[in-house]
């Protein structure tokens, strides 16, 4: 089964989904690009956007020749005492939205998002496990989640028991407000791994060149110590300047490291081969060929193959996911 392991659900809430979308800063400036990547006009944001976006995702999965995509909910930020941090987010996607979409569309695999400091965190976790969640997605540096805090042990132990994968953003984040820059390293997953949770470090800890720290070496070192740690290659075929030629060489030359990489697109973030061609990571002919793909999911997949990610990256996640109820 070939799976895109990193696809964002987005909604405006007009259809009663409970989602909201309040872009600002870079997200507002990049909004036309995000919509174009989905093949949608900006006017779709004023219509029944959830229905339009869901149909676009299903179409892109088919066009890319994939079997499924992990659809990500998006939690709000909370303080350590469980109080909501008001006004800190750019968008919100409740768990029930992705669980509901997955019940209606077999090509969607639901990834919920729960802040472990929420006062109802364990109850919500249980509800989501029973509802068929296969993964839990978080952005520690954006949502203020320190997974190494001992107060989160019970939460992580239940995740391990249920076989729920933890997908955590690592490395640079420039589209949403960052509350805890110190939580960008894959090392934030240490306690979860020690407890027995299978973890995926989204973006492999990569940082934007000249702007943010790069934690790729930390990620590689951790894979040598933790058999349950994986990374995904989401956002590595884009214009973010976060993926370096030496990192791709290392993946190509280290079979054990390559065996820890999972395919992910980061849709609706646009895919582009321009930076990679300029850095000599792919040929200019590869970049030109990628422009023939209208859908960003198919283009991203083609570029990842051109970079040298092996086909096993596309099927690896299927062997790690818990069965859906």
Image (spheres, rainbow, N blue to C red):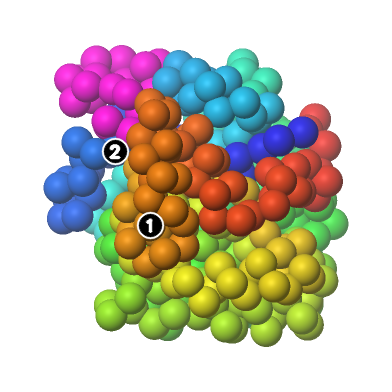
Q: What whole-number distance in Å separates the C-alpha atoms at marks 2 and 1?
A: 22 Å
Q: Main secondary structure of the magenta part?
A: helix
Residue 228 is left or right of residue 246, and the answer is right
- Image quadrant holding the C terminus, namely top right
Q: What residue sits right under mark 1 in the picture?
A: 277
Label 1, secondary structure: give it.
Answer: helix
Q: Which mark is drawn over residue 2? A: none
- Residue tagged by mark 2? 34
Q: Quadrant of residue 12?
A: top left
Query: Is 82 left, or right, of 159 in this rendering?
Result: left
* Residues packed near mark 1 inside 10 Å, few (<14), some (14 to 19) or many (20 plus): some
265 vs 1: above or below? below
Percent coordinates x, y for residue 1 in the rendering: 77, 33
Q: Which residue: 19% across, 55% down?
A: 26
Residue 21: x and y in percent read: 27, 38
Question: Magenta residues, as a range?
Answer: 35-54
Q: Residue at x 35, y 71 (%)?
A: 208
Image point (28%, 49%), residue name = 90
């Amino acid at each position: 089964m070939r799976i895109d392991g990193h696809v964002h659900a987005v909604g405006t809430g007009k259809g009663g989904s409970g989602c909201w979308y309040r872009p600002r800063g870079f997200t507002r400036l990049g909004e036309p690009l995000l919509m174009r990547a989905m093949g949608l006009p900006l006017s779709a944001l004023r219509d029944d956007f959830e229905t339009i976006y869901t149909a676009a995702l299903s179409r892109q999965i088919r066009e890319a020749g994939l079997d499924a995509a992990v659809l990500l909910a998006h939690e709000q930020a909370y303080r350590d005492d469980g109080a909501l941090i008001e006004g800190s987010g750019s968008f919100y996607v409740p768990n029930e939205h992705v669980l509901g979409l997955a019940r209606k569309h077999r090509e969607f695999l639901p990834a919920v998002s729960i802040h472990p400091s929420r006062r109802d965190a364990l109850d919500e976790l249980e509800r989501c496990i029973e509802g068929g969640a296969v993964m839990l997605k978080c952005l520690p540096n954006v949502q203020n989640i320190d997974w190494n805090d001992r107060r989160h042990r019970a939460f992580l132990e239940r995740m391990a028991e249920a076989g729920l994968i933890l997908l955590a953003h690592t490395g640079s984040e420039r589209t949403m407000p960052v509350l805890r820059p110190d939580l960008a390293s894959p090392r934030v997953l240490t306690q979860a791994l020690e407890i027995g949770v299978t973890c995926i470090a989204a973006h492999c800890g990569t940082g934007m060149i000249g702007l943010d720290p790069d934690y790729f070496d930390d990620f590689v070192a951790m894979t040598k110590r933790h058999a349950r740690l994986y990374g995904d290659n989401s956002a590595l075929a884009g214009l973010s300047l976060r993926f370096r030629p030496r990192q791709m060489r290392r993946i190509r030359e280290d079979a054990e490291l390559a065996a820890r990489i999972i395919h992910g697109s980061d849709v609706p973030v646009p895919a582009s081969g321009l930076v990679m061609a300029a850095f000599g990571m792919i040929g200019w002919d590869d970049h030109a060929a990628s422009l023939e793909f209208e859908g960003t999911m198919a283009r991203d997949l083609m570029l990842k193959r051109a970079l040298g990610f092996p086909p096993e990256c596309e099927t690896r996640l299927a062997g790690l996911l818990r069965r859906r109820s």
